[in-house]
Image (spheres, rainbow, N blue to C red):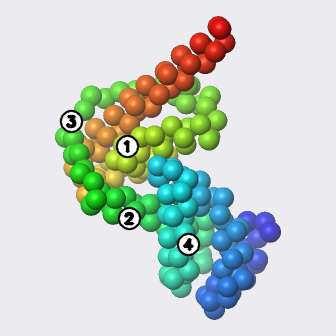
Amino acid sequence: MPEYNSAVLQELLDGCLKKNRRSQELLYKQFYGYAMSVCLRYSKSKEEAKEILNDGFFKVFTKLESFDTDRSFKTWLGRIMINTALDHYRQEVRRDIYENVEAGEQVSVDETIISKLAHEELVALIQKLTPSYRLVFSLYVIDGYTHEEIADQLKISLGASKSNLSRAREKLREMLSKINIDNYDRVTR
């Protein structure tokens, strides 16, 4: 079923509003890949991403009547998945001690290295970051949030948002350097 076929999508949404299980299943299957790609950016593992995804779809099905049909469903779904990931993160933070770092040096990332990585490799590297670094990096770099919006969403200071982004970039640079060294060692053996 084509994702952009608005008549088919509208029929699925109408069925979901009527609590039709088959419509819910088809909508879930139709948008699973997109939603999972969003969730993977905010999680530390595929299992955690699945948990976020399922929580997100639960919200979709329970709040579907608030969806504005004049807008893009995919955009609305993406927002729900991001917000669900942030909710999940906040729950995790309550269990862990959150390190609020006020300052950090600014570090640039060699964008050409990142562009050469396959999507899956980049997601795997991002998943290795600590939760606070992973969230700030994903929100800022991938989803285009400002530091002010990130600070507000995560209930941290503006300085902590900037510092976490800087440190996330530095950690990614270290991981990328290690990958390059490992690849060089394999080739020269």
Q: Is disc 3 placed on a helix, strand or loop?
A: loop
C-alpha span from label 3 to label 2? 25 Å
Q: Residue at x 76, y 70 (%)?
A: 5
Q: Is residue 165 above or below residue 76?
A: above
Residue named by callout 3? 103
Q: Which mark is residue 130?
A: 1
Question: Which residue is at a point 27% across and 28% down the rendered structure image?
Answer: 105
Q: Secondary structure at mark 1?
A: loop
Which quadrant holds residue 123? top right
Query: Can the viewer see residue 151?
Result: yes
Residue pushed farthest top? 188
Give x and y (percent) for residue 129.
41, 40
Secondary element under disc 4, as helix, strand or loop, is helix
Q: Please state which of the two labelled residues, at mark 3 or mark 4, is closer to the viewer.
A: 4
Residue depicted at x 76% and y 78%:
7
The answer to whether marks 4 and 2 mark residues whose Cβ atoms lie closer than 8 Å is no
Label located before the other in sequence (1 or 4):
4
Q: CA distance from mark 1 to mark 2?
A: 16 Å
Q: Amino acid at mark 2?
A: Asp
Q: Residue at x 59, y 58 (%)?
A: 36
Q: Amino acid at mark 3?
A: Ala
| Separation of marks 3 and 4 at Cα, in angstroms | 37 Å
Residue 140 visible? The answer is: no
Q: Is residue 147 above or below residue 26?
A: above
- Lower position in the chain sequence, tag 1 or tag 2: 2
176 vs 38: above or below: above
* Residue denoted by label 4: 57
Q: Is disc 4 surrounded by few (<14), some (14 to 19) or many (20+) residues within 10 Å?
A: many
Q: Which mark is residue 87?
A: 2
Percent x, y of residue 19 = 62, 89
Picture coordinates of residue 79, whole percent (x, y): 49, 64
**Between marks 3 and 2 in the image, the one whose residue lies nearer the viewer:** 2
